């Protein structure tokens, strides 16, 4: 995975762009994501069906992987069976 690379879900409509990453397999809806959508869709795993939100950034617990959702879908993002988390916005400094 390189920054700028686009990945598409095999189980739903979700598409993401890699912001920061290394060579790992990203899953969406319990199925591996790839550069192209497969001809036959994979089944959506109910454990990974909480959805993805457009414009949101998803990160792993260590902060080594960061993905930007460019198209929402029903599947949730994960790596090795561990769900990715929404990246929290940094608080702005006080203007006082």
Image: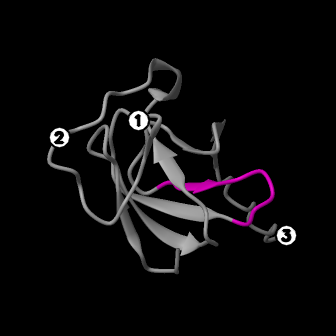
**Figure check: 96 above or below 55:** below
Q: Main secondary structure of the magenta part?
A: loop
Check if residue 59 falls in the magenta segment: yes
Q: Position of residue 23 (x, y in %)?
A: 61, 70
Badge 1 density bin: few <14, some 14–19, many ≥20, Cα 10 Å: many
Q: Which of the marked residues, 1 or 2, is nearer the chain's N terminus?
A: 2
Residue drawn at 44 percent across, 26 percent down: 49
Residue drawn at 49 percent across, 46 percent down: 27
**Figure check: 47 above or below 58:** above
Q: Position of residue 62 (x, y in %)?
A: 81, 58
What segment carries the magenta color? 56-64
**Inter-mark Cα distance, 2 to 3:** 57 Å
Check if residue 12 falls in the magenta segment: no
Q: Would you identify the image quadrant in which residue 37 lies?
A: bottom left
Numbered disc 2: secondary structure: loop
Q: Position of residue 16 (x, y in %)?
A: 40, 60
Q: Which of the marked residues, 2 or 3, is nearer the chain's N terminus?
A: 2
Colour setup of the view: one colour
Q: Residue furthest right?
A: 96
Residue to which mark 3 is pinned = 96
Q: Nearer the viewer, residue 91 or 62?
A: 62
Residue to which mark 1 is pinned = 75
40 lies left or right of 30: left
Residue to which mark 2 is pinned = 40
**Inter-mark Cα distance, 1 to 2:** 16 Å
**Inter-mark Cα distance, 3 to 1:** 43 Å
């Amino acid at each position: 995975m390189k920054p700028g690379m686009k990945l598409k879900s095999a189980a739903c409509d979700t598409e993401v762009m890699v912001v920061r990453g290394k060579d790992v397999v990203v899953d969406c809806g319990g199925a591996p994501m790839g550069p192209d959508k497969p001809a036959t869709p994979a089944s959506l795993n109910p454990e990974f069906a909480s959805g993805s939100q457009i414009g949101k950034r998803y990160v792993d617990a260590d902060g080594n992987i960061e993905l930007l959702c460019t198209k929402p879908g029903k599947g949730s993002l994960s790596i090795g069976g561990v769900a990715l988390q929404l990246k929290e916005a940094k608080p702005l400094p006080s203007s006082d």
